[in-house]
Image: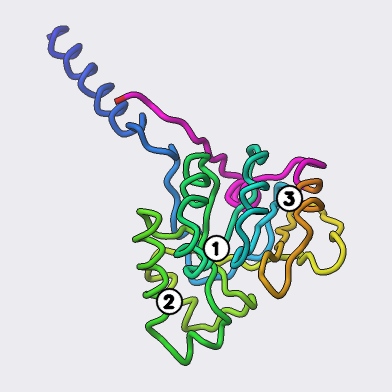
Amino acid sequence: MKRTLLLVGSFTILITLFFIVPRNYPSILPVFQLTEKPTVISKGTYGKTVTIDLTFGKEEIETLLKDLKAPYPHFFISTEWMERSAPIIKTMQDKHIPIGLLGQDGAIYIEDPALFQKEVDHFEKVMGEKPLWFRTKDYQFPVEVQEVAWQQEVNLLSSSKYWDEEVPVLTKGDVLSVPLHQEERVDIKQLTKLLKSQSFLPIEQNIFGLKMNTKTFPE
């Protein structure tokens, strides 16, 4: 009887460990569809988060990434930038820098209902997985986008502060958007200085208090 109980107990422990311990996955906490209904999130609770909207740039982006240390800002990149920046994306993936999908202006998704799916498919083809986070370039999220994103298990993120001409003063819970476009971009040196000036949290930790760990376990 004792032997039977011991075997059952050992088996239970092994099953538990099988599901708890990841096997060579980059993130030990998979998260998706973090809200209970279609919702656009714009502010957190637990700290400050920097997000970078990236559609243009190469050399200065490489310079930025070279000295970047965790906790990293969350990059939102367009499918067009993905197409011409494969080496930089590889660097971002190697460093486990979080990447979301940056779309077009919100109204375009009403004109082209299939566009969101096309962009998600493109992102998955390049990155090897669906985007966890999505935002439109103009921070407008039509109801149609909210519903299709919910169906695709993609979370929508806007922001509470936008870096226009001067660095905004950030308070607890803020999500800062930083533009790096051809027609509108902040100075990379100022951005680097900001990232080193204070402590920032990943999106999930700021909004939900979820701590994201990145580790590699032997097979």
First in sequence, mark 1 or 2: give its number: 1
Q: Secondary structure at mark 2?
A: helix
Q: Please give the name of the residue rendered at 81% of the width and 46% of the height, measured from the top-left corner.
A: 193
Where does label 2 land, which residue?
Answer: 116
Residue 91 is inside the magenta segment: no
Q: Compare residues 14 and 181 and report the one nearer the observer.
A: 181
Examine the rendered structure and indicate whether residue 13 appears above or below residue 95: above
* Residue 48: numbered disc: 3
User: At which x and y percent is residue 185?
Assistant: 73, 66
Marks 3 and 1, how far apart at CA: 20 Å
Q: Nearer the viewer, mark 1 or mark 2?
A: 1
Q: Secondary structure at mark 3?
A: loop
Q: Nearer the viewer, mark 3 or mark 1?
A: 1
Q: Please give the name of the residue rendered at 45% of the width and 55% of the height, measured from the top-left corner.
A: 86
Q: Please give the name of the residue rendered at 37% of the width and 37% of the height, measured from the top-left corner.
A: 25
The magenta segment is 195-218
| Location of residue 216 by image quarter | top left
Where does label 1 land, which residue?
Answer: 77
Q: Compare residues 23 and 20 and report the one nearer the observer.
A: 23
- What main secondary structure does the magenta stretch of the protein show? loop
- Dot 2 alpha-carbon crowd within 10 angstroms: few under 14, some 14 to 19, many 20 or more: many
